[in-house]
Structure formats: C-alpha cells, structure tokens
Image: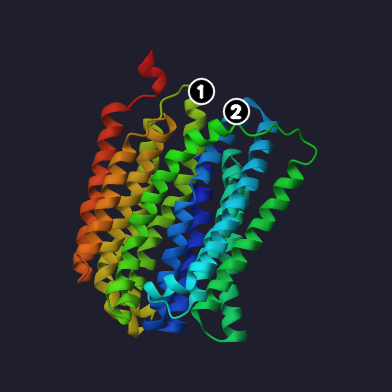
C-alpha cells in the first residue's frame, strides 16, 4: 500500500468514525438536555483523561513492533504483545477496583448525580487501554486496514447501541456510557481473535522490558500532560460553573474535539513510519512536516465552518437549548489545533530519543492546573489559561524540532 493511499484510507476511516462518534454525542445531547448533558460530557472527559494518560502503550508498541517487523523478528512481536497484555490486565484490574471503591466520594466532589456514572467512566477507560494494546500491534505491523475497520466497528456499536439502549431502558447518562463499554469490548474481541489466528503456532520470545520501559515511561509522562491539557477544563467547568453552563461548554467541547479526530489517522501513521525511517537511517523532518500540513489542511475545514455558522451548527445538531454554546466553538477548536500540532511535531523527538520536551510539557501542565484553580469564574478566564499554556508548549516544541532535529540522529553523528 502506498503512503498516499494509506493516508487517504486512514483519513476516510477516521472521517466515518468521527461522523458516528458525533452522531452518538449529539444524539445523547439532544435526548438528555443541557443539565443532564453536563454529567455526560464530564464523564466523557474522565474517559478521555484516563484513556489518554494510559495510552502510551499504543505508540510504544507501535514503534517497537515496527522495528521488530523491519528485522523480520515475528517471535519477538508475539512475545511483546503477550507480555504487555498480561501485565496491563493486572494493573487495569486494580485501577477498576479502586475506581469502584472511590466512586461515591469522587462523584460527590465532581457533582455527578450518580456514583455509577463515575465508575462507568473508569471502567471504560481501562477496557479501552486493552483495546489500545492490540491497536498498537496492528499499527506497528503496518496493518492499517484492519485498524481502520476496528475504529469503525467501535464507533458504530457505540452509536447504534445508545439508540437501542435508550429505546429499551429510557434515556440516561449511564445508558449512554453502557453503550460505550459494549463498543470497546466488541472491538477488542474482534482484534484479539484476528491476532490470535494470525500468530497461532508462531514462536514466542519474552519481551525486553528495558526496551519497552525506556520508551514507555517518557510517553506516559507526555500523555498524562496531554490528558490534563485536553480534559481538565471540562472538569473545572463542571466543578465551578452552573450545571446549565457546564452542559453548554460540554457540547462545544465535544464538537471542538472533532478537530482532534482528524489528527488521529496521521498520528497512527506517524509512529511506525518514523520508526521505520529511523531504523533505516533516513531523514525524518520532511515526513513530519507533510503530516503536519495534512492536519492543518483538514482542520481548516471545521474551523472555517465553526467561524461562519456556529449558531446554525448548534441549532441543527443539538437543538435550540444549546444555542448558547455557539461563541465557544471557534476558541475551543483553536485549542485543539494547538494541542495536536505540538503532538505531531513531538513524534520526531520521540523517534530520535530526545525527551527534553517533557520539561516544558510538565511545567505548562502544572501551570494550567494552577491557573484553573485560581481563574475559573467564567469560561473566558478558563480559555485564557488554556491558550497561554498550550501556546507555550507548541512554540517550545517547534523550536526544539527545527533548531536541533532537522536531520536524523544518524546524520548528525556522521
């Protein structure tokens, strides 16, 4: 499969998945109304917060498997998948139990109407992490078509499952989250069966945990920061602003995250592609800039629409009750572009093993949390905090990439 064809297929699959995901989010919003939608959007932010924080295993596996595949070491690929799933299951099981125990207390702190909502969010994030492991293996093997099918299966089951559950048991936040849980379970079962069938009878070599941890630990630090960047604002709004206003902010946030959906297929391609180029001692910057250009071109479409027709979009998608969210669409979409642009550039630094960028991520993450703790009287204050911190990250990352890493590590050492 050519790189252009692979990119187009990945973007198409992401577009279909995004449409189904938006349909799910909008259907739930129109069904629940602004006040109860505050619970749902905060629950989604919790899912994204934990899923993103726990997600580094996906790019870690993608890069490691891509290197093994380049060398033809199939036994090592099977072994690293087996060992990672075993260890992850233990830790994720513990996280789920802890989430169940803490759900009454934390649900009250975040003003959820039910502890079950908080627990379902944690359980969904844990299950999604298992799914991410197998998706990381597919990415590393360059099996992008099965990966694309997987995300379409997940988004389809989540969307239509919510419709069925609402029809059978009534409209509720917990019913919408149960559909999310079911979608993740079905998607993971399909991938697990596929990989088990393909790898049946192959030799197994235990994972080199030094190699895994050397890449995974920095990525965990990065993705924890990204999780905070992308979701702390929604939790701050839920904590400090009225429920109706929180619901409006949640609706705008969910639509703005659509810009990030366009970034996902490029991110999926970036990890294994850059790892293979680096393994072959070839330059990386041109590939990263091409992916960045793809992202900005794609993201420009929804941003233009949000800037021209925000009232119409909210009225058509969510209904008249959500029209107050219109002024938030464009600034939140701009934030999504800042966050994801920096993350694409960071892929080059990760590939060459330069993790100095983590310092600026950690510093600005702490600054954002502190800023939200002090400045949360209005959505304007919250957005200002986000723009200051995340603009600083993008500028610092861009400077690091262009000043120090315009060539591959091998060329610099020559």
Looking at the rendered structure, the secondary structure element under dot 1 is: loop
- Using the image, determine if residue 279 lies above or below residue 150: above
In the rendered image, residue 157, in percent from the top left (x then y), is placed at: 60, 68
Residue at the image position 47 percent from the left and 26 percent from the top = 278
| Left or right: 391 in relation to 44 | left
Classify mark 1: residues with Cα within 10 Å, few (<14), some (14-19) or many (20+): few
User: As drawn, is 113 to the left or to the right of 358?
Assistant: right
Q: Is residue 201 visible?
A: yes
The image quarter containing residue 243 is bottom left
Q: Which residue is mark 1?
A: 280
Quadrant of the rendered structure where residue 111 is?
A: bottom left
> Of the numbered discs in the image, which one, if any, rests on residue 70?
2
- In the orientation shown, which residue stands out farthest toward the right? 201
* Label number found at residue 134: none
Asked whether 372 or 314 is in front, the reply is: 372
Q: Earlier in the sequence, mark 2 or mark 1?
A: 2
Rendered residue at 39%/34% (across/down): 348
């Amino acid at each position: 499969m050519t790189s252009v064809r692979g990119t187009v297929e990945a973007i198409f699959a992401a577009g279909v998945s995004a449409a189904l995901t938006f349909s799910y989010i909008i259907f739930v919003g129109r069904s629940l109304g602004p006040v109860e939608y505050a619970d749902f959007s905060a629950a989604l932010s919790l899912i994204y917060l934990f899923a993103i924080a726990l997600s580094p295993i996906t790019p870690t596996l993608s890069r490691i498997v891509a290197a093994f595949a380049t060398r033809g070491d199939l036994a090592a690929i099977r072994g690293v998948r087996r060992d990672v799933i075993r260890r992850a299951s233990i830790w994720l099981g513990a996280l789920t139990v802890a989430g169940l125990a803490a759900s009454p207390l934390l649900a009250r702190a975040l003003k959820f109407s039910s502890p079950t909502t908080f627990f379902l969010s944690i359980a969904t994030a844990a299950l999604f992490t298992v799914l991410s492991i197998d998706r990381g293996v597919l990415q590393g093997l360059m099996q992008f078509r099965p990966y694309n099918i997987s995300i379409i299966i997940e988004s389809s089951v989540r969307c239509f499952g919510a419709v069925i559950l609402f029809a059978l048991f009534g409209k509720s936040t917990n019913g919408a989250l149960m559909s999310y849980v079911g979608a993740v379970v079905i998607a993971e079962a399909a991938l697990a069966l596929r990989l088990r069938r393909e790898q049946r009878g192959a030799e197994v070599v235990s994972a080199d945990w030094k190699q895994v941890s050397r890449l995974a630990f920095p990525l965990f630090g990065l993705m924890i920061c990204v999780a905070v960047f992308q979701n702390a604002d929604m939790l701050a709004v839920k904590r400090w602003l009225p429920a109706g206003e929180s619901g409006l902010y949640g609706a705008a946030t969910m639509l703005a995250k659509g810009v990030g959906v366009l970034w996902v297929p490029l991110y999926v391609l970036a990890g294994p592609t850059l790892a293979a180029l680096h393994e072959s001692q070839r330059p990386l910057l041109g590939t990263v800039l091409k992916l960045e250009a793809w992202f900005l071109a794609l993201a420009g479409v929804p941003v233009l629409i949000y800037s021209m027709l925000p009232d119409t979009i909210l009225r058509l998608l969510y209904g008249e009750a959500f029209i107050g969210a219109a002024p938030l669409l464009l600034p939140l979409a701009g934030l999504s572009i800042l966050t994801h642009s920096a993350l694409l550039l960071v892929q080059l630094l990760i590939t060459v093993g330069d993790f100095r960028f983590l310092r600026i991520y950690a510093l600005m993450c702490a600054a954002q949390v502190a800023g939200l703790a002090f400045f949360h009287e209005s959505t304007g204050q919250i957005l200002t905090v986000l723009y200051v911190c995340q603009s600083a990250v993008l500028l610092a990352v861009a400077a690091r990439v262009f000043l120090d890493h315009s060539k591959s590590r091998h060329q610099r050492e020559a």
